[in-house]
Image (cartoon, grey):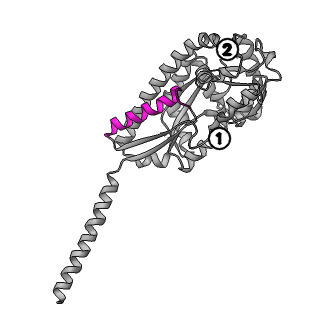
Amino acid sequence: MKKSALLMMVLMLSTGMFLWANGAQESDSSKPVEIIFTSVSIPGDSHTEAMYVFADKVKELTGGSVEVKVYDSATLFTQENEYDAVISGQADMAYISFPTLATQIPSFSMFGSGYFFSSYDHMTSVLNGDIAKDSIWPTVHELGLQPLGSMYLGSRVVNTKDKMINSYADMEGVLLRMPGSESWLFLGEALGANPTPLSFSELYTALQTGAVGGQDNPLPTVESAKFYEVTKYLAITNHVIDSIMPCVNLDKWNMLSADQQDAVMEAMAYAIDFNDKERIARENSLVEFFEGEGMVVTYPDITEFRDNVQAAYAGNSAMTSTWDMDLYAKVQSMAK
């Protein structure tokens, strides 16, 4: 074969290889950015439904360039492991609570403390307003997370298997399941109970067998997790107006274009509105439902609970010394 023909063949092959590689690169870049969204929330729970609402809205607003894959019911990670999974990039997104964040940012225990928020309106005006964006989100960024807002979890009540709670004193001796962080466990102590850490996925069986005597969650969670099947009493204490913060791994967030980031933020605002409306509507109807299921609902003196719980926090100087008391006072001044 002549040298000129051989050279032409080499050029054709190398050009073909270049075109193939370039085509593969173009094909890869055309694939949607994938966001793995993990949660321990279960089917029927508004937070689970909101995950799918969010995923659909992201697809719509980005024209399919961002795809959210939803994994609920702790199918990927437990409540204890999902934070580390998002930080490490094993998952891209999760609902993160303030007590969980407080394991890394001790001052954040303030936002999950007993009777910190007075109402839903108070909570969402703070956590979805300028205070959050100016005073909370920048600190969360330092952990490697991008917050997308705060979603209403509900007003937490005490749900017990065998003991009726009519007063703060009745909490003594209750083996109360709490998530396994220092802030959560101290909340259990402040409520006057004997807190014990336990994964949410194990809670139904623990209540059923009597391994724990009670748990605290908002009414919609009691309903969706079917805790009413294995407990008898509900005490409406409303000790935490609770929220969770949808957060994305910051490296994943920075992979998105500015337009994609705006679309994801808009989609989450839409999902938060969906969840919060659903959550409030369900809270308003569930007491009657639980009473129809044979549960006994009690209404302890909220002022008594609030005074005792806040006194317990005031006595925990190791925790409260980390709080930003100027910010605390600013938040409290916004109470309605």
Which numbered dot is residue 205? none
Total numbered labels: 2
Quadrant for residue 143, please give it.
top right
> Is residue 99 something that shows in the picture?
yes
Alpha-carbon span between mark 2 and mark 1? 27 Å
Q: Is residue 297 magenta?
A: no
Which numbered dot is residue 236? 2
| Numbered disc 2: secondary structure | loop
The x and y percentages for residue 234 are: 69, 16
The x and y percentages for residue 67 are: 39, 42
Relative depth, front residue between 99 and 65: 65
**Callout 2 amino acid:** Ile
* Residue at (60% x, 46% y) in the render: 84
> Is residue 115 something that shows in the picture?
no
Which numbered dot is residue 80? 1
The x and y percentages for residue 95 are: 55, 35
Looking at the rendering, the stretch of residues picked out in magenta corresponds to 42-63
